[in-house]
Amino acid sequence: MTDLTNPIYNNEDAARKHFEASRWPDGPICPHCGSVNNAHEMTGKSTRAGVYKCRDCREQFTAMIGTLFERSHIPLHKWLLALHLLTSSKKGMSAHQLYRMLGFGSYRTAWFMAMRIRYSYRDLFPEEKGPLGGAGKIVEADDTVIGGKERNKHRNKRKAENRTGGSMGKEIVFSLVERGGKIRSQHVASISASTLRPILKAQIDAASSLMTDMGGANRILGDGFARHEMVNHSIDEYVRGDAYTNAVEGYFATLKRGIYGTYHHVSPQYLKRYLAEFDFRYNERSALGVEDTERAAKALKGVVGKRLTYRQPSGRKENRDQA
Ligand SMILES: [Zn+2]
């Protein structure tokens, strides 16, 4: 559970120091000349807190430069609180609830913050870009449909419909999970060998065992892997030895509860960002030894290099609007 009494969620100075420690574990890094730990914090009445002056190039800088927080009118402690709330809620958190819990801004501000935080999950761990699986490891692959009235339909029926071409408002998600490890989800245009094969080839080590069901293009996707087992869901076969797709299906269940129960509607153009959010929480889950505080700390690393580039609501103005 989030400890909301932590000063980093209530006090701007504590929030700034927390962020500086996260971004600069070895001391301040000058964004102008790259010098490390050779700057001093400026003091004096005319200088705001957190401005550093580089002893090498004499330029000034703050920890916010080049991050999601640069030029944001939203106080940093509110950003940290939003980040913690979003990363610790298993099914996500709606902008309405986020707005209530932040006690700040407006619904629109909360929506904007959540969208930016989702964006910051992108390329968060470049060192984990390599393929999933490997010799002796198992990777499960499956697809599901988000949108339309899918949640009311029987699994076999909706899959059959989707695989004969699909229709408007039904978005296809294709996910790969290394059993006992990490997930990667993508929003794909269709279920066919030509869309899925390149993903499998790039994302899964060929020495892995691949587990799928028998639907769609799966029969021909196993080529090139050490082993490919399929379970036949249409005859109610779900487990045969180590052949099953329970991990990826468990992820889809959480994803759907979140998207239908928390977010109600997700526009196709933003689906990728929601997938990044659910993937992040799955990959940094308690079962893998990651608890709430550490998960938020990891997410905070993602704000670097994600500077705001489009119009954002001003926290100050929106407060005034509400008064
Ligand atoms: Zn410098």
Image (tube, rainbow, N blue to C red):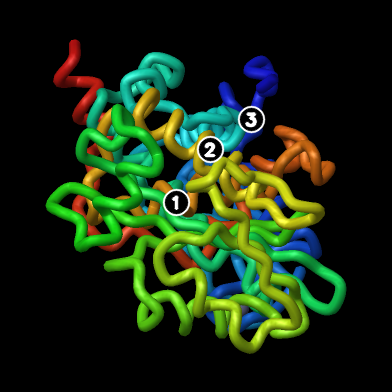
> Within 10 Å of the Cα at label 2, are there few (<14), some (14-19), or many (20+) other Cα atoms?
many
Seen from the viewer's position, the closer of residues 112 and 280 is 280
Q: Is residue 52 visible?
A: no
- Label 3: which secondary element: helix
Q: Which residue does the image show at 57% across and 30% down from the upper left?
A: 90
Q: Position of residue 74 (x, y in %)?
A: 37, 37
Instruction: Name the amino acid type tagged 3.
Output: Ile
Q: Which mark is residue 8?
A: 3
3 or 1: tag closer to the N-terminus? 3
Residue to which mark 2 is pinned: 83
Q: Is mark 2 within 8 Å of ligand 1?
A: no
Instruction: Name the amino acid type tagged 1.
Output: Leu
**Relative height, residue 221 to residue 114 (above, below):** below
Q: Residue furthest front?
A: 235
Q: Is residue 278 visible?
A: yes
2 or 1: tag closer to the N-terminus? 2
Q: Position of residue 19 (x, y in %)?
A: 63, 47
Q: Which mark is residue 299?
A: none
Q: Residue 317, located in which quarter of the rendered image? A: top left
Q: How many marks can you see?
A: 3
Q: Nearer the viewer, mark 3 or mark 1?
A: 1
Mark 2 touches mark 1? (CB < 8 Å): no
3 or 2: tag closer to the N-terminus? 3
Q: Nearer the viewer, mark 3 or mark 2?
A: 2
Q: Which residue does the image show at 70% across and 84% down from the upper left?
A: 206
**Relative height, residue 211 to residue 147 (above, below):** below
Q: Which mark is residue 275?
A: 1
- Label 2: which secondary element: helix
**Quarter of the image with the C terminus in it:** top left
